[in-house]
Image: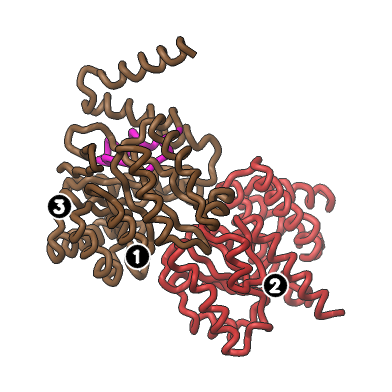
Amino acid sequence: MQTILRSASKEVVIGGDNPFCIIGERINPTGRKAFQEQLKLGDISRLEVDVAQQVAGGAMVLDVNMGAPLVDEVGLMSRAVEMIQDLTDLPLCIDSSVIEALEAGLSAYEGKALVNSVTAEDERMDAILPLVADHGAAIIMLPNDETEIPEDPRRRLELVDKCVEVAHGRFGIPMEDIVIDPLAMPVGADTSLVRKTLETIGLVRERYGLNMTLGASNVSFGMPDRHALGAAFLPMAALAGLTSAIMDARSPQIVRAAKAADLFLDHDPWGGAWIATHRATQAAAGSG
Amino acid sequence: MNREELLKQLYDDTLVGNAPSVLELTNEGLAMDLGPEELLFEALIPSLEEVGARFERGDFFVPEMLVAGKAMAGALEILRPLLAETGAETMGTFVMGTVKGDVHDIGKNLVNIMLEGAGFHVIDLGVQVAPEKFIAAIEEHKPDIVGFSAFLTTTMPMFKANINALEKAGLRDEVIVMVGGAPVTQEYADAVGADGYAADASAAVAKAKDLLARRRAAAHA
């Protein structure tokens, strides 16, 4: 299964034998006080730094979220998407829980975007999936509904069934454009939670072979040495069937872990990418 | 073990979240005629305050906070009926819930555990709690504080809806309103007219105590 995302000039493929797709999570004001203040004033200049750092770190797609209290999320989304397309040719992942903001982002975007996200709630699917279908975008779908975020992997799989049935069956979204988020939870809150995410990944792969992505930073919330945990988690998840993650692309430790997973899972023929990165790092160190 | 040693040991074992030992020491303390208030105010609560302080400093992490809170909650189950008998004032009653339209509960549950650990009686209404349900719970339990949790920017507006419902029911002045959740900020809490906001579970406990102390001081003044 291959999910193809496009900017005006670049194509990125998730899944198949392609490398693990690193979606940069940084363009998001949650927990960033200074950035929130700027957004409140309509100032999006900070995006320049966020884009540059993530591109340099190895992001292949950039997530764009403008959701903060007391900001004009719809207006900001459309301006941010326009600005980011001037800064980079990476495809974008339009991220909001506000439907109008998704719409604004998709309208401002040239290419085939990934939309983040829709839950298995009927009302949300009815509102968001037509938009996704209209724009020919790909969609991240979450196996939680209006009553619960299930812990049990089998219950999550049932909700994935529902997602597929509605998105593909009813709205005609191609299977390859459905990307499942198996729900990454903080291991610090309950040490059984990440296992359940890994099991969900295995079940979804087995039943559908769909591409999957998740918020990788969630797993290490509330714990020390977060980058080390992220770096250990990704290869485990990749082995289970995760093909992408929304993650901290500025962390060499986590990015290298994803690249090592590519190598070990035979998604990096002859280790070409791994060696090339090593050489580039050496050259940069030498010239610095 | 004398009384001082027992209180010290209870403090230490709560700090590291050794639940079986905390239970045992609580029973032992009662058997050697330590009052439930002594156990609570001279060992358990100071210990949990230290947990909160360490968390704030970044020396303690979420699981450590959780096990300490759970150890403390175990002791409180034994002590609560005894405290009620002696007429001692409990810390307060807290009605908590995730707002309508939102099913996220991990953060809320963390706050509950810490509140219980701090001696609050917590009534958790779960997730997807509609304004009417909050109102009914407030009428039934007469809490000192009600807490609204939201994880999404799209569900945060329910804070205002809930507060409006409180006003309409004539309950706004009867209860302290606290709000929290990943996207929530102090400024947003102020904008919707909440009485308090905290960024994490440990800060939420400190804030709850602070708000309650002010309310009680104002009532006595």
Q: In the rendered image, is residue A171 in sight?
A: yes
**Whole-percent x and y of residue B160?**
54, 75
Q: Amino acid at mark 3?
A: Met
Q: Which residues are magenta?
A: A233-250
Q: Which chain is red?
A: B
Q: CA distance from mark 3 to mark 2?
A: 53 Å
**Quarter location, residue B91:** bottom right
Q: Which residue is mark 1?
A: A100
Disc 2 element? strand
Chain where mark 1 sits: A
Q: Nearer the viewer, residue B120 or B21?
A: B120
Could you tell whether A131 is left or right of B164 in the image?
A: left
Q: CA distance from mark 1 to mark 3?
A: 25 Å
Disc 3 element? helix
The crowd level at tag 3 (other Cα within 10 Å; few <14, some 14-19, many 20+) is some
Q: Is residue B37 rendered magenta in the image?
A: no
Q: Which residue is mark 2?
A: B92
Chain where mark 3 sits: A
Q: In the rendered image, is residue A236 in sight?
A: no
